[in-house]
Image (tube, rainbow, N blue to C red):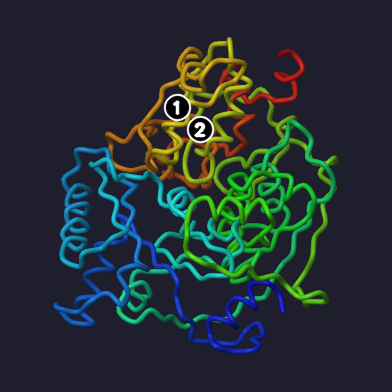
Amino acid sequence: MTITEKILAAHAGRDRVVPGENVWIDVDILMTHDVCGPPTIDIFRREFGARAKVWDIDKLVVLPDHYVFTSNHQANRNLDILREFAVEHKLPHYFDAHTDEYKGVCHAALAEGGYNRPGTTLFGTDSHTCTSGAFGLFATGIGNTDAALIMGTGKIWVKVPETMRFVFEGELPPYLMAKDLILTVIGDIGIDGATYRAMEFDGQAVYDLPVEERMTLTNMAIEAGGKNGIIAPDEVTIDYVKSRTDSGFKPVYGDEGARFHSERVYDVSKIEPVVAKPHRPDNRATVSEVAGTRLDAAYVGSCTGGKLQDFEAAARLLKGQQVAIDTYMVPASTEVQRQLHTTYVDGVSLFDVLTDAGCKLGKSSCAACLGGPVDTFGRTHGNEVVISTTNRNFPGRMGSKQSSVFLASPYTVAASALTGQITDPRNVMTSA
């Protein structure tokens, strides 16, 4: 069996499962946030009763993050509903948006909080819950009704997915990042190429990446229609998790000779920096093909591109220079936000590098990635052309439906911010 199949089999109390089979499984963690949490709570109360109790308060994690810094009264009411529910059920893993407990974007917070434990199952009311699969667990997004079922029973009905395997061989060139790898894959198979399939990533280039960079690969599995993304845990993964939690876990690995739906092998030395052109994540082009495209703004942030390594990459290109266009920086988590002041590039903190270069820094949140209310930081309001480290570039995704969004790695975004047009990061690295 593949790693995905073995995890599902264990949580179904079975020795074996096969793709296409439907099984009831036990859920280790349920996550929800301020967008989908309130309707999930409504369904839970309707179906289980107004006085029903959560199946296990230690396994429910509530992380407001999407619309937390806004004056919009509807968004504010959603936060109130979460707060009231957390108090009512005495939830130990609720992190209020306007207190010192606030964590930032849910997917980053799950990793930092030690909730991503190898061999476990994690479900969340967010399509990018697949991010957690970078730690060797089965993680996927679900709707509010399924979340309410888990909230009341701790179980869910799952169809076992087939697994597609993607192997990146060789040493990763210094101008490539995980974003280039996953955009290459999505460009090859399309936005529906992995529909209801597991996307398993392997190869030297994958394991050379820090854990946070691997999260970029699994995060965007959903952009190809994937049920989940997953990377078998190695020593780096296990050390990261053990540094974050005392909870026990048992790593799971696929069997030799496991059957895959398909396998694609890439030589990373032959991959160029790439972008996804408007308005689809699979509308791939090499940066050299679109170089010179005029830009109005650049954006580094989101669960995909707001991790510490993303800001380190941007800072290496921006240090000592000035951006030519509006450039927004939004840390994915409050932990990353703090690390900007304590992580250095040539003796200068990331915070100082970025602000000295003219970047505008926002508070940790999803911010403009989901559009949001009109007062959302970094939101587009007209026909701007934006280059961004986020994960989706559909019309209206970052605000205005008239804007055009190019998806790219932090290197490409930073290089482009310096020139005001799409720029190959290799050119900036060569001249630095």
Q: CA distance from mark 1 to mark 2?
A: 6 Å
Residue 238 screen position, x and y as percent: 62, 56
Residue 336 screen position, x and y as percent: 46, 36
- Considering the numbered disc 1 on the image, is that residue within a helix, a strand or a loop? strand
Seen in the image, is 194 located left or right of residue 398? Answer: right
The quarter holding residue 275 reads top right
Against 83, residue 311 (above or below) is: above
Q: Residue at x 67, y 75 (%)?
A: 162
Seen in the image, is 74 located left or right of residue 382? Answer: left
Residue 210 screen position, x and y as percent: 65, 44
Between 302 and 26, the one nearer to me in the picture? 26
Which of marks 2 and 1 precedes in the sequence?
Answer: 2
Against 227, residue 426 (above or below) is: above
Q: Residue at x 24, y 38 (%)?
A: 70
- Considering the numbered disc 2 on the image, is that residue within a helix, a strand or a loop? strand
The quarter holding residue 290 reads top right
Mark 2 burial class by Cα count in 10 Å: few <14, some 14-19, many 20+: many
Question: Label 1 sits on what residue type?
Answer: Tyr
Seen in the image, is 191 located left or right of residue 144? Answer: right
Instruction: Name the residue beneath numbered marker 2.
Output: 300
Q: Residue at x 67, y 49 (%)?
A: 182
